Amino acid sequence: MNALDYAILLGTMLGIAAYAMWSTRGGHDLRGYLKGAGETGWLTIGLSVMATQASAITFLSTPGQGYESGLGFVQNYFGAPLALIIVSAAFLPIFRRLKVYTAYEYLGHRFDPKTRLLGAGLFLLQRGLGAGITIYAPAIVLSTVMGWRLDATIVCSGLLVVAYTVSGGCDAVSLTQKYQIGVIFAGMVAAFFFLLAELPPGLGLSGSLALAGGFHKLEAVDFSLNPDRRYTLWTGLIGGMFLALSYFGTDQSQVQRYLCGASLRESRLGLMFNAVFKIPMQFFILLLGVLIFVFYQFERQPVYFNRAAWDYQVAHGDGARLRALSAAFDAAKAEERAHLGAWLGARRAGDPSAEAAERAASASAEGRAEAARAQTKAALRKASPTNTANDADYVFITFILDHLPHGLIGLLVTAFFAAALSSKAGELNALGTTTTVDIYRHLARREATDAHYVMMSKLFTALWGFVAIAFALFANLAENLIQAINILGSVFYGVVLGLFLVAFFLKGVRGTAVFWAALASQALVFGLYFTLTISYLWYNIIGCAACMALSLALQAAINLGGGGRTPAPRT
Amino acid sequence: MTGPPDDERTGLPGFRSWRQVYVCVLVVLAVWIGLLAALSRMSP
């Protein structure tokens, strides 16, 4: 990066933060601080929801996933439009009618205080434990590639997001997210068109797609019913719908975004904006990765993209073996490039038989190159077992630094930081709000002025920010901890969703039944997690189904015992 | 005749109720899946 890139990075990030702090300056009442001034339009809500979900790792890693595995990952998002329709039709009108600040406040209205605390507690545990990951994950990749100090990267980006989130509350978060997602889109679109322009003459988009198809990178939809396949149409529609319903319907970091809406209509349109554009956005990011794969078929590429890890092991580990693998990779790639050049010539000449022969020969060479790359990855993992980083995370940033012009490099690095800050701001805003409304105001101090609650909300938001920064700094020493916390988070979602689905759809169930059912279901999910080896996605469905079924059973038992005569509150 | 209640007004031309908006989103989802399935067929 040169001075121009740094100017773009610092000018954009500081400029957006300063503008948001200036725009939202002045005194806030509690409603204004936690839910905004009530003027937020559908586009801001839609972009804010999108920005909260899409973290820096989405933009850093997803092109790498497209490069390695093709478009199949897009199926993970097929359930999102279905979930967003359910949230818009069933969840949102009730949240707005009750004028709640948090989703868990609704559980208090519908059931009782202990169920509300359970929902809020599960959210705080899950999001709070993972608070540092959104900052740490992009910082480790960017600092490794750029040679920046990891702790300085974490502290600078962490303090910036804490400053504007604490200062301006919900409105500052929505405002910054709108501009940050604009920067992200601008960077990704610019990279896409630059990449197209850099492809060999005559190849173009259609030729690139034909080439990528030859390497099975365009298999976007898999109709297979095989449960061992990770991404299929069915896991995407069913598992993806449950995951998205948990996330968009019950996670305060998302609920707070659409509760900021000026009206029910604005909030609904914001959600429908995501229902329509989420899949094409993810497809576009994966396609970028596929085009980077095509680009590297004609350009020299490293056998391992994480150069810092590679250089270290070459210098301190089995350097001779790694160099031999690199040489084998380079030889296979050179052969592949020669066959692809001939394929391109046959394609221009309209010679289908030569085209097929050259494509088969290039696929064979690609297989040998991939085998050398897989052996390199295995050798590096064996040499450094604590290094759990995925090499695919380094594909896009390596391409950017090696092949994009200055200015565009600055724009793309800014986009990664914008993505990190926008998702972190949504999380901090939600953690501060839930701690204030569901814990502090509910348990510690029920009667106080708005100014007091606003001050406490700022304090809790800042506290969660510092926890996140501290965790991100500590995570450097324990990367496996990050993986454990990610897994822990995923096993909570199903039960929380179960709580809300019981609240919305099982009108006869009361607080005591659902509370104990949720605790038992969470224990069941933990038990299954430690005994089974199934995909995490299934725990969303198991936790949710167990919570609903046990709630019904317990309520029936309570009714039989004569304890269920109190009518359910109206929602 | 009375129009739809405030909660049901979409403010979108051609969509008189949210149910119509949701159906349209489902159609868009089906179109996306169809187009992606067609793209998958480019693999030999």
Image (tube, rainbow, N blue to C red):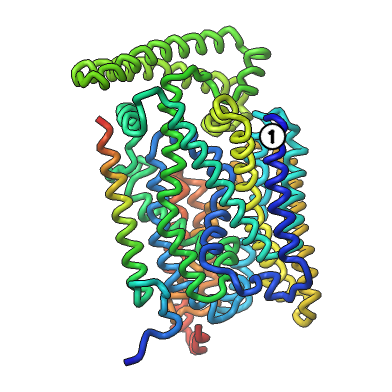
Quadrant, the N terminus of chain A = top right
Residue at numbered disc 1: A4
Query: Which residue is painted at 55% across and 67% down in the image?
Result: A258
Query: Which residue is painted at 53% across and 66% down in the image?
Result: A518
The percent position of residue A211, horizontal first and vertical second, equals 33, 27
Left or right: residue A570 compared with residue A223: right
Query: Which residue is painted at 41% across and 21% down in the image?
Result: A297
Left or right: residue A11 compared with residue A266: right
Q: Quadrant of residue A451?
A: bottom right
The percent position of residue A552, horizontal first and vertical second, equals 43, 74
Say what amino acid the circle numbered 1 marks: Leu
Q: Nearer the viewer, residue A443 or B42?
A: B42
Query: Which residue is painted at 63% across and 66% down in the image?
Result: A120
Task: Tell me if residue A119 comes above or below residue A420 in the rendering.
Answer: below
Residue A523 seen in this snapshot: no
Q: How many marks?
A: 1
Q: Dot 1: within a 10 Å radius of its alpha carbon, few (fewer than 14), some, or many (20 or more) residues?
A: some
Q: Quadrant of residue A115?
A: bottom right
Task: Tell me if residue A122 comes above or below residue A411 in the rendering.
Answer: below
The percent position of residue A223, horizontal first and vertical second, equals 27, 45
Task: Tell me if residue A262 comes above or below residue A201 in the rendering.
Answer: below
Q: Nearer the viewer, residue A235 or A546?
A: A235
